[in-house]
Amino acid sequence: MSLSTPRDAASPTPATTSSKPPLISELSIYSVVLGDQLMKPNYPSLHREDLLGGQKTIGVARLYVCPRCFKYTIEVVDHIAHWDYCKENLEIPGLMIYESADQSIYEFDGTNEWLFAQNLCLFAKLFIETKSVCYDVSTFLYYLLVKAGKHGPEIVGFFSKEKLSWDNNNLACIVVFPPWLKQGLGQVLMAASYALSQRDGRLGGPERRKSRFDNVASLKQLTTNSL
C-alpha cells in the first residue's frame, strides 16, 4: 500500500527555504472523498503533480483523503486499507486545550507535526481561496476542532496562527470542512482564537487577506470561553 505524502517520509524536517517544493502548479481536483464523505472542491489544489500520477493537463477525477492524518491517494483500495489502520491506531496530534460535551480543540506545532500539517493544509486549500502556505508550516501553530463521530473523533475544521506576528495577528487561516458547515463551528473557532489571544496578550486581529468565510465570521458577535 502506498499513500502519497508531500515529502519523502525519511526526511527528518521540512525545508524552510521555500513555501513550495518543486513540481507544483495549481491542479484541478474534481471531487474529494474525506473518509467516506464525498465533496466538491471550491478551488484548485497545490498537491504535487508527481504524487498524483502527473495528471496536470486532465486533472484528477477523485482524490481520497484520510480524515485522521490527511494523507491522500488516487487509489480507492489504498485509501480504504489506510483509513482502517488510522481509525484504530492514530491519535489526534497535539495537546487538548479545550473540551466540552461534544467538542474539543487540540493545539500542535507545525515544526513537530510537519507532515500532518502539510497534508492538512493541502486539503484545506481545496476550500480556502486565499490559502497559499501549505509546505512551510514550521512557523505556525495549528488548532484542530474535533467532534465525536460515527468512526470516532472527527477533525471538522481548524485555524492557524503565526508563532511570531509583527502585526500581532491572532489568525492566519480558518476553515470548517464542508460536511460540518452551518453548525456554528466557525464561531467556535473564532471564539477560540480570541480567547487564546487574551491568554497570550496578543491584542491584534486576523490577517487582512482573508477568504469570504473569514469575512462573514469576523462580523458575527462571538462569545469567548476560557481555554
Image (spheres, rainbow, N blue to C red):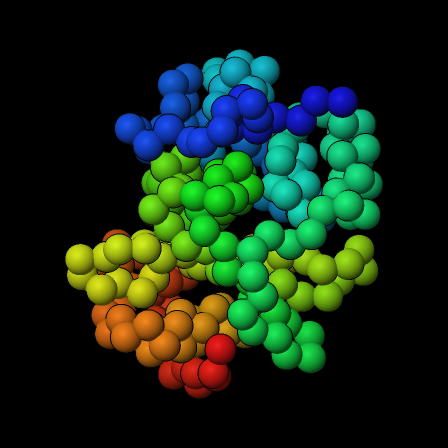
Quarter of the image where one finds residue 192 = bottom left
Looking at the rendering, in which quadrant would you find the N terminus?
Answer: top right
- Kindly give the residue lying farthest to the left in the view shown: 166
Quarter of the image where one finds residue 106 = bottom right
223 over 11 or under it: above or below: below
Residue 88 in sight here: yes
Q: In this image, 72 relative to 218: left or right? A: right
- Kindly give the residue lying farthest to the front in the view shown: 12
Q: In this image, 16 relative to 142: left or right? A: left
Residue 17 percent coordinates (x, y): 28, 28
Residue 217 percent coordinates (x, y): 40, 70
**Which residue is at a point 68% across and 41% down the rendered structure image?**
66
**Which residue is at a point 43% across and 83% down the rendered structure image?**
224
**Which residue is at a point 34% across and 40% down the rendered structure image?**
132
Residue 158 in sight here: no
155 over 129 or under it: above or below: below
Q: In this image, 47 relative to 75: left or right? A: left
**Which residue is at a point 24% across and 74% down the rendered structure image?**
203
Residue 187 percent coordinates (x, y): 47, 74
Q: Nearer the viewer, residue 116 or 112?
A: 112
Residue 143 percent coordinates (x, y): 49, 60
Q: In this image, 57 relative to 30: left or right? A: left
Q: Nearer the viewer, residue 68 or 163?
A: 163
163 over 147 or under it: above or below: above
**Total marks drawn?**
0
